[in-house]
Amino acid sequence: MSDEVDVPEDHPRYQSLLTRHRIEAGVEKGITSKQGLIAEGRGEAFDYLLGEETIPSADAAERVAAAYFLLAEHPVVSVNGNVAALVPEEVVELADVTGADVEVNLFGRTEERMQAIAEHLREHGAEEVKGLTADARIPGLSHERAKVDRDGIYDADVVLVPLEDGDRAEALGEMGKTEIVVDLNPLSRSAQVAAVPIIDNIMRAIPNVTAHARDLQDASREELEAIVEAFDREEALAAAERRLREGAREDAQDAK
Protein backbone atom coordinates (compact mmCIF):
# COMPACT_ATOMS: atom_id res chain seq x y z
CA MET A 1 0.00 0.00 0.00
CA SER A 2 2.99 2.28 -0.61
CA ASP A 3 1.04 4.43 -3.04
CA GLU A 4 -1.24 5.68 -0.28
CA VAL A 5 1.02 8.58 0.61
CA ASP A 6 3.38 10.58 -1.54
CA VAL A 7 6.39 9.75 0.65
CA PRO A 8 9.13 7.22 -0.18
CA GLU A 9 9.11 4.09 1.93
CA ASP A 10 12.64 4.75 3.15
CA HIS A 11 11.54 8.05 4.67
CA PRO A 12 12.24 7.87 8.45
CA ARG A 13 8.65 8.87 9.24
CA TYR A 14 7.02 6.80 6.49
CA GLN A 15 5.12 4.44 8.79
CA SER A 16 3.87 7.30 10.92
CA LEU A 17 2.72 9.29 7.89
CA LEU A 18 1.04 6.20 6.41
CA THR A 19 -0.82 5.62 9.66
CA ARG A 20 -2.03 9.22 9.81
CA HIS A 21 -3.14 9.06 6.21
CA ARG A 22 -5.20 5.91 6.78
CA ILE A 23 -6.97 7.48 9.74
CA GLU A 24 -7.65 10.67 7.76
CA ALA A 25 -8.97 8.66 4.83
CA GLY A 26 -11.13 6.73 7.27
CA VAL A 27 -12.73 9.95 8.48
CA GLU A 28 -13.56 10.89 4.90
CA LYS A 29 -15.03 7.43 4.31
CA GLY A 30 -17.12 7.52 7.47
CA ILE A 31 -15.15 4.75 9.18
CA THR A 32 -13.13 6.65 11.76
CA SER A 33 -14.02 9.66 13.86
CA LYS A 34 -12.20 12.89 14.66
CA GLN A 35 -11.66 11.45 18.13
CA GLY A 36 -9.81 8.62 16.41
CA LEU A 37 -7.30 11.11 15.10
CA ILE A 38 -6.61 12.23 18.67
CA ALA A 39 -6.21 8.62 19.81
CA GLU A 40 -3.76 7.98 16.97
CA GLY A 41 -1.63 10.93 18.04
CA ARG A 42 -1.51 9.67 21.61
CA GLY A 43 -0.50 6.20 20.46
CA GLU A 44 2.15 7.58 18.14
CA ALA A 45 3.84 9.29 21.08
CA PHE A 46 4.09 6.01 23.00
CA ASP A 47 5.33 4.17 19.91
CA TYR A 48 8.09 6.75 19.48
CA LEU A 49 9.24 6.08 23.04
CA LEU A 50 9.18 2.34 22.39
CA GLY A 51 11.54 2.87 19.46
CA GLU A 52 8.84 2.19 16.87
CA GLU A 53 9.58 -1.52 17.00
CA THR A 54 8.16 -4.68 18.51
CA ILE A 55 10.04 -5.13 21.76
CA PRO A 56 10.83 -8.70 22.95
CA SER A 57 8.12 -8.74 25.62
CA ALA A 58 5.51 -7.69 23.06
CA ASP A 59 6.58 -10.41 20.65
CA ALA A 60 6.27 -12.95 23.47
CA ALA A 61 2.77 -11.66 24.24
CA GLU A 62 1.84 -11.92 20.56
CA ARG A 63 2.91 -15.56 20.59
CA VAL A 64 0.77 -16.19 23.67
CA ALA A 65 -2.16 -14.46 21.96
CA ALA A 66 -1.77 -16.81 19.00
CA ALA A 67 -1.77 -19.81 21.35
CA TYR A 68 -4.95 -18.57 23.02
CA PHE A 69 -6.63 -18.14 19.63
CA LEU A 70 -5.70 -21.66 18.57
CA LEU A 71 -6.94 -23.11 21.87
CA ALA A 72 -10.20 -21.17 21.82
CA GLU A 73 -13.56 -22.68 20.98
CA HIS A 74 -14.90 -19.33 19.78
CA PRO A 75 -12.35 -16.52 19.31
CA VAL A 76 -13.48 -13.08 18.13
CA VAL A 77 -11.55 -10.07 16.84
CA SER A 78 -13.30 -6.86 17.86
CA VAL A 79 -12.94 -4.03 15.34
CA ASN A 80 -13.45 -0.31 15.85
CA GLY A 81 -13.01 2.51 13.35
CA ASN A 82 -9.26 2.94 13.76
CA VAL A 83 -8.63 -0.79 13.52
CA ALA A 84 -10.70 -1.02 10.34
CA ALA A 85 -8.83 1.92 8.82
CA LEU A 86 -5.35 0.75 9.79
CA VAL A 87 -5.32 -3.05 9.44
CA PRO A 88 -8.40 -4.35 7.60
CA GLU A 89 -6.60 -6.97 5.52
CA GLU A 90 -4.48 -8.03 8.47
CA VAL A 91 -7.55 -8.55 10.67
CA VAL A 92 -9.19 -10.67 7.99
CA GLU A 93 -6.03 -12.75 7.60
CA LEU A 94 -5.79 -13.33 11.35
CA ALA A 95 -9.41 -14.45 11.42
CA ASP A 96 -8.84 -16.79 8.48
CA VAL A 97 -5.76 -18.40 10.04
CA THR A 98 -7.31 -18.89 13.49
CA GLY A 99 -10.96 -19.45 12.62
CA ALA A 100 -12.01 -16.33 14.53
CA ASP A 101 -15.09 -14.22 13.96
CA VAL A 102 -14.77 -10.51 13.15
CA GLU A 103 -17.19 -8.18 14.94
CA VAL A 104 -17.58 -4.42 14.67
CA ASN A 105 -18.03 -2.69 18.02
CA LEU A 106 -18.12 1.10 18.44
CA PHE A 107 -18.42 3.65 21.22
CA GLY A 108 -19.78 6.23 18.77
CA ARG A 109 -22.14 3.74 17.19
CA THR A 110 -24.39 4.80 14.35
CA GLU A 111 -26.01 2.58 11.75
CA GLU A 112 -24.11 4.43 9.02
CA ARG A 113 -20.71 3.88 10.62
CA MET A 114 -21.45 0.24 11.38
CA GLN A 115 -22.44 -0.41 7.78
CA ALA A 116 -19.46 1.56 6.43
CA ILE A 117 -16.97 -0.41 8.53
CA ALA A 118 -18.59 -3.74 7.70
CA GLU A 119 -18.47 -2.93 4.00
CA HIS A 120 -14.84 -1.77 4.29
CA LEU A 121 -13.90 -5.10 5.89
CA ARG A 122 -15.74 -6.99 3.15
CA GLU A 123 -13.82 -5.01 0.55
CA HIS A 124 -10.65 -6.33 2.20
CA GLY A 125 -11.71 -9.97 2.14
CA ALA A 126 -14.05 -10.55 5.08
CA GLU A 127 -16.82 -12.99 4.22
CA GLU A 128 -18.87 -12.42 7.37
CA VAL A 129 -18.84 -9.41 9.67
CA LYS A 130 -20.72 -9.52 12.94
CA GLY A 131 -21.91 -6.65 15.10
CA LEU A 132 -24.83 -5.36 13.06
CA THR A 133 -27.47 -7.51 14.77
CA ALA A 134 -26.66 -6.32 18.31
CA ASP A 135 -29.06 -8.78 19.93
CA ALA A 136 -27.15 -8.99 23.22
CA ARG A 137 -25.49 -6.66 25.72
CA ILE A 138 -22.30 -6.81 27.78
CA PRO A 139 -23.38 -6.51 31.43
CA GLY A 140 -22.20 -3.46 33.32
CA LEU A 141 -21.82 -1.11 30.35
CA SER A 142 -24.29 1.71 29.73
CA HIS A 143 -22.89 3.03 26.45
CA GLU A 144 -23.10 1.80 22.87
CA ARG A 145 -20.17 -0.60 23.20
CA ALA A 146 -22.41 -2.79 25.33
CA LYS A 147 -24.25 -3.80 22.13
CA VAL A 148 -22.84 -7.04 20.69
CA ASP A 149 -24.00 -10.03 18.68
CA ARG A 150 -25.11 -12.99 20.77
CA ASP A 151 -23.32 -15.41 18.43
CA GLY A 152 -20.24 -13.15 18.37
CA ILE A 153 -18.55 -11.36 21.26
CA TYR A 154 -21.26 -12.32 23.74
CA ASP A 155 -20.67 -16.04 23.15
CA ALA A 156 -16.87 -15.82 22.67
CA ASP A 157 -14.35 -17.35 25.04
CA VAL A 158 -11.37 -15.33 23.70
CA VAL A 159 -11.72 -11.73 22.48
CA LEU A 160 -9.03 -9.55 20.93
CA VAL A 161 -9.75 -5.94 21.89
CA PRO A 162 -7.34 -3.74 19.92
CA LEU A 163 -6.63 -0.16 21.01
CA GLU A 164 -7.74 1.54 24.22
CA ASP A 165 -11.06 0.27 25.55
CA GLY A 166 -10.62 -0.09 29.30
CA ASP A 167 -14.19 -0.38 30.55
CA ARG A 168 -15.20 -2.98 27.97
CA ALA A 169 -12.03 -5.00 28.50
CA GLU A 170 -12.80 -5.02 32.22
CA ALA A 171 -16.42 -6.02 31.61
CA LEU A 172 -15.41 -8.84 29.27
CA GLY A 173 -13.07 -10.16 31.94
CA GLU A 174 -15.91 -10.12 34.45
CA MET A 175 -17.91 -12.25 31.99
CA GLY A 176 -15.17 -14.87 32.22
CA LYS A 177 -13.69 -14.22 28.79
CA THR A 178 -9.99 -14.14 28.02
CA GLU A 179 -9.31 -10.67 26.66
CA ILE A 180 -6.25 -9.88 24.59
CA VAL A 181 -5.52 -6.17 24.32
CA VAL A 182 -3.31 -4.30 21.87
CA ASP A 183 -2.34 -0.98 23.42
CA LEU A 184 0.79 1.15 23.21
CA ASN A 185 0.32 2.41 26.78
CA PRO A 186 1.13 -0.26 29.41
CA LEU A 187 -0.43 1.95 32.09
CA SER A 188 -3.85 2.20 30.42
CA ARG A 189 -6.75 0.43 32.11
CA SER A 190 -7.25 -1.82 29.09
CA ALA A 191 -3.67 -3.10 29.28
CA GLN A 192 -3.83 -3.40 33.06
CA VAL A 193 -6.93 -5.61 33.04
CA ALA A 194 -6.06 -7.74 30.00
CA ALA A 195 -5.16 -11.38 30.34
CA VAL A 196 -2.67 -10.78 27.53
CA PRO A 197 -1.50 -7.16 27.17
CA ILE A 198 0.31 -6.61 23.87
CA ILE A 199 2.21 -3.32 24.09
CA ASP A 200 2.81 -2.75 20.41
CA ASN A 201 1.60 -0.80 17.39
CA ILE A 202 -1.53 -2.39 15.94
CA MET A 203 0.08 -2.36 12.48
CA ARG A 204 2.85 -4.63 13.76
CA ALA A 205 0.88 -6.56 16.36
CA ILE A 206 -1.85 -8.10 14.21
CA PRO A 207 0.54 -9.47 11.54
CA ASN A 208 2.82 -10.75 14.31
CA VAL A 209 -0.01 -12.67 16.01
CA THR A 210 -0.96 -14.14 12.64
CA ALA A 211 2.64 -15.19 11.94
CA HIS A 212 2.86 -16.89 15.34
CA ALA A 213 -0.47 -18.62 14.73
CA ARG A 214 0.84 -20.02 11.47
CA ASP A 215 3.98 -21.26 13.22
CA LEU A 216 1.95 -22.90 15.98
CA GLN A 217 -0.77 -24.48 13.85
CA ASP A 218 0.76 -27.94 14.16
CA ALA A 219 1.51 -27.62 17.88
CA SER A 220 -0.29 -29.98 20.24
CA ARG A 221 -2.82 -28.74 22.73
CA GLU A 222 -0.33 -29.47 25.48
CA GLU A 223 2.31 -27.32 23.80
CA LEU A 224 -0.13 -24.44 23.36
CA GLU A 225 -1.27 -24.71 26.97
CA ALA A 226 2.37 -24.63 28.11
CA ILE A 227 2.92 -21.38 26.19
CA VAL A 228 -0.12 -19.83 27.84
CA GLU A 229 0.82 -21.11 31.29
CA ALA A 230 4.35 -19.70 31.10
CA PHE A 231 3.20 -16.17 30.27
CA ASP A 232 3.76 -13.54 32.98
CA ARG A 233 1.47 -10.62 32.20
CA GLU A 234 2.89 -8.48 35.01
CA GLU A 235 6.40 -8.86 33.66
CA ALA A 236 5.23 -8.07 30.14
CA LEU A 237 3.74 -4.80 31.40
CA ALA A 238 6.83 -4.04 33.48
CA ALA A 239 9.16 -4.67 30.53
CA ALA A 240 7.16 -2.27 28.35
CA GLU A 241 7.17 0.39 31.04
CA ARG A 242 10.95 0.02 31.44
CA ARG A 243 11.40 0.51 27.70
CA LEU A 244 9.24 3.64 27.79
CA ARG A 245 11.17 5.09 30.72
CA GLU A 246 14.70 4.00 29.91
CA GLY A 247 14.83 3.15 26.22
CA ALA A 248 16.57 0.24 24.54
CA ARG A 249 19.41 0.19 27.08
CA GLU A 250 17.28 -1.77 29.58
CA ASP A 251 16.37 -4.46 27.04
CA ALA A 252 20.01 -4.83 26.07
CA GLN A 253 20.92 -5.43 29.72
CA ASP A 254 18.10 -7.95 30.12
CA ALA A 255 19.36 -9.89 27.09
CA LYS A 256 22.83 -10.44 28.60
Image: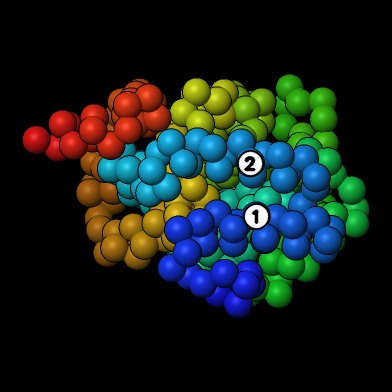
Q: Position of residue 123 (x, y in %)?
A: 71, 75
Q: Residue at x 50, y 36 (%)?
A: 46
Question: Which amino acid, by three-letter code, is at mark 1?
Answer: Arg
User: Which part of the image, by quadrant, shows the N terminus?
Assistant: bottom right
Are there few (<14), some (14-19), or many (20+) residues within 10 Å of tag 1?
Answer: some
Q: Looking at the picture, does residue 13 appear above or below residue 234?
A: below
Q: Which residue of the protein is positioned furthest toward the left in this rendering?
A: 256
One can see residue 74 in this view? no
Q: Residue at x 82, y 30 (%)?
A: 143
Which residue is denoted by mark 1 in the rendering? 20
Which residue is denoted by mark 2 in the rendering? 41
One can see residue 248 in this view? yes
Q: Position of residue 117 (x, y in %)?
A: 77, 60
Q: Looking at the picture, does residue 183 appear above or below residue 151?
A: above
Q: Secondary structure at mark 2?
A: helix
Are there few (<14), some (14-19), or many (20+) residues within 10 Å of tag 2?
Answer: some
Disc 2 or 1, which lies upstream in sequence? 1
Asked whether 220 or 104 is in front, the reply is 104
Q: Position of residue 20 (x, y in %)?
A: 65, 55
